[in-house]
Amino acid sequence: LADPERLSLDERIGLANGIPSPYLQEPLLLQAEPEPEQPVSCAELAMADEQSIMVNEMVAAIAGRYVDQFALQGQLSWLRTLFNLAPPTVTTIPLTARQLEIKFAIPAG
């Protein structure tokens, strides 16, 4: 993972030297949520339906695919994956020169 200023993409061979850190791709990840008046357990959140019990399984499956592709193939072909469980949808953004240029103004070179 790298900062956009240090990224480059060689279109001749279709490889980037890294991908932007998740917090750069989605700045809201670092935005603090308001503190609850009393601590709430995961079980209580599940009962309140604040977070589906399937969210952790979905995140684990997606993260596992990223690790699998990186560890076994030595590369990543996806920039990010977005999902929603109501209704169930998954969108994967490919790691391409066009996507890096659109999101981070990183020219191919």
Image (cartoon, helix red, strand yellow):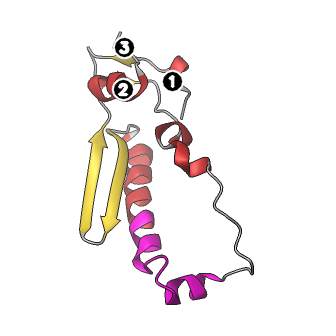
Residue at (37% x, 56% y) in the render: 65
Residue 67 located left or right of residue 83: right
- Which amino acid type is marked by label 1? Pro
76 over 84 or under it: above or below:
above
48 over 54 or under it: above or below:
below
Q: What element carries label 3?
A: loop
- Which amino acid type is marked by label 2? Leu
43 in magenta: yes
Disc 3 versus disc 2: distance between alpha carbons? 8 Å
Q: Position of residue 13 (x, y in %)?
A: 28, 19
> Camera-side residue: 101 or 11?
101
Q: Where is residue 90 in the image (x, y as percent from the top left)?
A: 27, 58
75 over 53 or under it: above or below:
above
Disc 2 versus disc 1: distance between alpha carbons? 9 Å
Kindly report the secondary structure that dominates the magenta region of the rendered protein: helix
Q: Mark 2 — residue? A: 100
Q: Earlier in the sequence, mark 3 or mark 2?
A: 2
- Which amino acid type is marked by label 3? Pro
76 in magenta: no
Q: Mark 3 — residue? A: 107
> Camera-side residue: 101 or 72?
101
Asked if the residue under mark 1 is in contact with the one under mark 2, i.e. CB atoms within 8 Å, the reply is yes
* Residue stretch in magenta: 41-59
Residue at (47% x, 39% y) in the render: 25
Q: Residue furthest top?
A: 109
Q: Mark 1 — residue? A: 4
Q: In which quarter of the image is residue 55?
A: bottom left
Task: Give neighbour class at mark 1: few <14, some 14-19, many 20+ (Cα, 10 Å).
Answer: some
> Camera-side residue: 61 or 50?
50
Q: Which of marks 2 and 1 is nearer the N terminus?
A: 1
> Camera-side residue: 49 or 75?
49
